[in-house]
Amino acid sequence: MSKTERGVALVTGASSGIGLATAQALSRDGYRVFGTSRKPMADTSDGVVMLVCDVTDEGSVQSAVDDVLIRAGRVDLLVNNAGIGLLGGAEESSAAQAKALFDVNVFGIVRLTNAVLPVMRRQRKGRIINLSSILGLIPAPFNALYASTKHAIEGYSESLDHEVRTQGIRVVLVEPGVTRTSFEENLTRADQPLTVYDTVRADAEKLMREIVETGDAPEVVAATVVKAANVTSPKRRYTAGRAAGQVRFIRRFLPESFVDKNLRKFNRLPA
């Protein structure tokens, strides 16, 4: 297929990091790309048109999709990338904070997906790629609520794929490992911190900083998204980066006791 035939792509959370790298990679691959950010941004130099979209607001979501349709007439690919992080013990977050996290990471995907599905159904063609994480496969101490959103995305995506497959639409998961993005940019701290967790929480944050510094470049994830977007018969899941593939193998094939022991060791928690 020539580059001019790739189609129209919409990438959420494209202001920086994985989203920006993905939007640029899709543009280079021949897609006409629209990216979204919460605040107005100039179009990129390589042709990505930036739109304002708050994924927690249905009106904003529909407006962004309508804008793409006015300009391009169709949506062939949706990449649901927008998300935020949350660091802290599970009981250190209020229910309101947990709901806000799910509103972005899970219901943001639901809103965008619901907005594009009628378009793709009319086209009899479309692909939706949801950015999950290796934390959608394994436990994540002091990231319990964030990991919960990724586990939710896994179940939602796999189920939805079965529902819409006969309509010419496929839903695919991309599972990055640790990626070198701005640590502070999309990270929230627990709103009800408890002193009992102060030391281990600080250790968890230190470990996160260390592994982010040596993580995969956002371009590694972007390349995986492009692959998942273009393959004729997509797999249900694509891991992005060597570490993500190793984690998936360990979780799937090795005994639970082994996984538990090594996860505590990796997180520097007592056995």
Image (cartoon, rainbow, N blue to C red):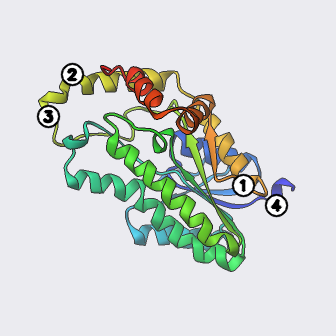
Does 16 sit above or below residue 242?
below
Q: Which circle's residue, 3 or 1, is located before the other in the chain?
A: 3
Q: What residue would you read off at disc 3?
A: 194
- Residue 234: give its label: 1
In this rendering, which labeled residue sits more in front, label 3 or label 4?
3
Residue plotted at (22% across, 55% down):
96
Q: Tell me the crowding category of disc 1: few under 14, some 14 to 19, or many 20 or more residues within 10 angstroms, Cα based.
A: some
Q: How many marks?
A: 4
Report the quarter where the C terminus lies. top left
Does 175 sit above or below residue 204?
below
Q: Which circle's residue, 4 or 2, is located before the other in the chain?
A: 4
Among all residues in the image, which is located at the extreme bottom? 122
Q: What residue would you read off at disc 2?
A: 199
The answer to whether residue 122 is left or right of residue 201 is right
Q: Which circle's residue, 3 or 4, is located before the other in the chain?
A: 4
- Amino acid carrying mark 3 in the image: Leu
Residue plotted at (72% across, 75% down):
124
Q: Is label 3 in contact with label 4 (beta carbons under 8 Å)? A: no
Where residue 239 appears, x then y in whole percent?
A: 62, 40
- Element marked by disc 2: helix
Does 219 sit above or below residue 124?
above
